[in-house]
Amino acid sequence: MSRIDLPGGTVTFLFTDVEGSTKLLAELGPEAYANALTQHRRIVRDASAAHGGVEVDTQGDAFFVAFPTADGALAAAEAARDALAAGPIRVRMGIHTGTPHLGDEGYVGADVHRAARIAAAGHGGQVLVSAATAALVGTDGLRELGEHRLKDFPEPVPIYQLGGERFPPLKTISNTNLPHPASSFVGRDREVEEVAALLRDGARLLTLTGPGGSGKTRLSIEAAATLVPEFKAGVFWVGLAPLRDPALVPETIGQTLGAKDGLAENIGEREMLLLIDNLEQVIAAARDLADLVEACPNLRLLVTSRELLRVRGEVEYPVLPLADPEAVDLFCARAQTKPDDTIHQLCRRLDNLPLAIELAAARASVLTPTQILERLSKRLDLLKAGRDADPRQQTLRATIEWSYDLLNPDEQRQFARLAVYAGGCTLETAEAVLDADLDTVQSLVDKSLVRRTGERFWMLETIREFATERLEASGDAEEVRRRHAEQFLALAEEAFPLVEYEAAMGGRAWTDRLEHDIDNLRAALDHFERVGPPEAPLRMAGALQDYWTARGHAAEGLGRIRRALDANPAPTEARARALIGAVQLATVNGEYGPRRRWDEEALDLYRKLGDARGVARALWSIGGDAVEDGDWEKAAALLSESLQVSREIGASEFVPWLTRTLAWTAASSGDWARARELYEQGLVAAREVGSRSAEGALLGSLGWLAVVEGRPRDALPIYLESLKIKREIGDRAELHIGLTGTALALAHARKGATATRLLSATTALRDELGLGEAWVRREKEEALSLIHTQLDEAAFAEAWEGGARLTLDEAIDVALQALSEGTEAQA
């Protein structure tokens, strides 16, 4: 008998599954796992029911739910994901919409299987959405992950992700995030085959060179797409157009891959192709790319650049203009017209450059090819570059300028103003800051001068360079840059207390939001540093201190704050905040020299300003200085005062961290009993306020205390619990601390080989994050000293080499296994 409660017609399916259930069972134990599973089932069922879902089937820890609307399915998945985020169970989800057959036994058809395959491709905490569902709900809030091949489905399908969080590559037959251009690919068949053949035949680092607009990016995408089945670990696109700092290139690649350890360690021996797009403005990173290729034997790099990288192992492939027939085909395809002699002549005047042809064809809806040719001829006659300029670049400039001249005054003004956004912007931002309007922005998109991805509007860098010139010539440049900079100053200051709170509690929503606009934030800071007002760099750099710490930008942030402090000595709240930020970032960098001077000045300013929260932070920071100086009495007094102020103003998120620092003071003075009492109080406070990050850190401190008190075996189960929490949160700096502490405990427990592997694995992570805390270094040195009494040189070298090959996830697995075995042995 068929189920009458199941929706029919167009149905949206939600499949869910627990990631790593077997491993989680082993970690939690049967009772705790059963309780967590029950809680998980209640959350999924409640979220589904609240949004109109009907449970079709449940098998083990997986759900199959049907919804009459796509919006309902998406809302249910988001609600369930958010509710599960704080617990130990990580659930992957897949959503797909179709029109399945509803029979006596339920749903039948390919749409059911497609939804299940999409869900299986994800990772815990990730919600994947099919193109069919995205078409119904819109792409706002969705991130495009490119085309992927699913098991039992012959053709690749576009997949989206709900939210902007980064995960490792999808677990599909062919992993790729290659962009999927909306327009058809015309011509270049021979070039696609040649580029693919070079990569197949052994080219490890292949650079496509040519002027802006020659079609390097599109050719590289098409060639890479043909190679997707041949690279087991995937083919990935990394766009560098917004970057200006070469040091950010490895980090950007790592973020694309979801790397949780060093980039070379993450790639290792995996068979992978990386498409690195628009390298020319960060060409100094070329040496890093060459090093990466040498370190990873099965990695291939396909790079697009206006100039050669000139590094070892590079193979060049010049991207020439289109052949005449292909250029005409491209114009006709875009303009939806038939070829004739005028079009042949027009394309030749454009030097057959793809971007130039695209721009010209965009005008075919209002001008005939003859009219386009006439206007272009006049414009080309007026624009002449120097004798040594690339003629194709001359032509492209002329084409862009000609297209610009055909805009009406409002379009020209908005086109120039949009250039101020280094990383693109939303329509709402453009409306608020640039006085843009929807019709004008849409017109610029239609004319191929502005592009749109999701909610953000952006320009090709070649076009943005021209737009920047127009902005400079307009007389509006400084005003537009001022408004842009003020917008991102406001964002940074709005985010500061929220990112500070996240840093204490273990969240990252606002940190992710700032990451999305990091290029605009940097541009705003550059503007303030150049033209002022004097206090603006202080306000902005100080407001970004916790973001820089969380995302591993400590060196950049410290440099920005130092320049701002030197430029503006006025005794303001902004200076006080920046001083505390400088101390925080200097500590992460291992620079202790100027900290005390900065701390004392910040405390004096905050007291004069009557800012109790600032006083609490400054006292906390100075207390840390006193600990480093070995002045335990002074440190305890300062930290106790900070703790008292924090409680008085309701800053409960500070309490567990302050208590931890106070406990460290007691431990450093040798008062182990008082230290243990304070650590335990801090742990209770962390659990009361719900700070998982503080809970993990305090457990780690209790583990360390057990080690230094001569109870290394007691430390093992404590470190086990701590490391599980730190892995759950994903804080790489705390994971580095946790693994180092675990290595120390294992060294004291005479597990020298395992301790050595962990210390080796953390070395690359420390270097990547720029971590330099002295107390962590002392832990490592103590562990190494113990290890050398347990292992001879050959055994140590073998263990160290083995640890260097571990990824961060693998190192955590090694640590958890060793801690589990040590704990069980004591039972």
Image (spheres, rainbow, N blue to C red):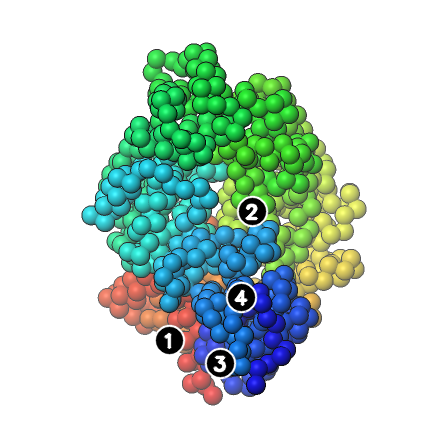
Task: Using the rendered image of the protein, determine whether residue 307 is visible from the camera's viewpoint.
Answer: no
Q: Residue at x 66, y 48 (%)?
A: 495
- Of residues 203 and 826, the one nearer the viewer is 203
Residue 793 visible in the displayed image: yes
User: Among all residues in the image, which is located at the extreme left?
Assistant: 201
Give the answer, above or below, for where 162 lies relative to 287: below
Q: Which residue is mark 4?
A: 99
What type is the residue that disc 1 sits on?
A: Arg
Q: Which mark is residue 25?
A: 3
Say which amino acid is labelled 4: Thr
Q: Secondary structure at mark 3?
A: helix
Which numbered tag is attached to residue 150? Answer: none
Which callout, 3 or 2, points at the residue further toward the start of the chain?
3
Rounded to the nearest whole Å, what is the CA distance between mark 2 and mark 4?
Answer: 26 Å
> Which residue is at 60% across, 75% downward?
6
Q: Which residue is mark 1?
A: 750
The mark closer to the camera, 3 or 4, is 4
Disc ID at residue 454: 2
In this rendering, the label closer to the viewer, 2 or 1: 2
